[in-house]
Image: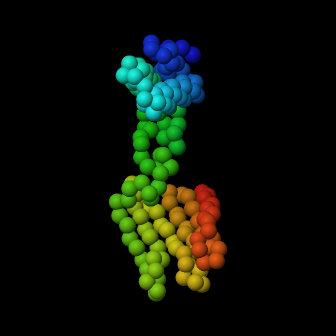
Amino acid sequence: MTDDRTPALGLQLPHPQNLLEQDVLRLRAAFASVDSACDTLAALIESRVTDAELAAAVAALQGSIGNLNTTVTFLTASKVGVVNGQTGPAVTLKPSHLGLGPANGPSLQTITRDGLGRVATLSTTVGGQVALQTLAYDGDGRLAGVTTIYDGRTRTETLNYTAGVLAGLSAVEETTP
């Protein structure tokens, strides 16, 4: 393992010769450093510090962010083995690779209604994939559940009512066979 470090804070940097598992820990340390610098800066601002103290805290934060930028730059696509079935340079930031779904920007939506005018299904297209949501209602006409099928997964949400008022929701998600 190559142990490069940043000049200002001595944070460990990822390196093309290191294993991804090693460099992920280095990224975590860099994010923790930035988080700590932000927390210190917020505390100083809150306690009405002098201009010199504030300037020092801002400089430390800028250094942490610079170190993080350097750290991320060293984490190249060629170092990535497999992410959600995609390998190395083929890894892209598509919603499906990140496990994102219909809430992340539909390009088309189609709604169907039942005989009472309630929404029965909602078909949403995201990144070329169709997510189909089927809504079910209880005897009182309240929404009782939503089943969503998207990209090989099925999510079933059940709404729970107490004294006629929504009291909670439970959900189960599984891979569709």
Q: Is residue 66 visible?
A: no
Q: Residue furthest right?
A: 162
Residue 30's x, y, as percent?
50, 25
- Between residue 50 and residue 106, name the one nearer to us: 50
Residue at 63% in and 61% down: 172
Q: Quadrant of residue 157?
A: bottom right
Q: Is 174 drawn above or below residue 115 in the view shown?
A: above
Residue 44's x, y, as percent?
46, 28
**In what quadrant of the picture does the N terminus appear?**
top right
- Between residue 13 and residue 128, name the one nearer to us: 13
Residue at 43% in and 33% down: 89
Residue 8's x, y, as percent?
45, 14
Q: Residue furthest left?
A: 107
Q: Is residue 147 visible?
A: yes
Residue at 35% in and 64% down: 108
Residue 124's x, y, as percent?
41, 64
- Between residue 30 and residue 161, name the one nearer to us: 161
Q: Is 149 drawn above or below residue 27 in the view shown?
A: below
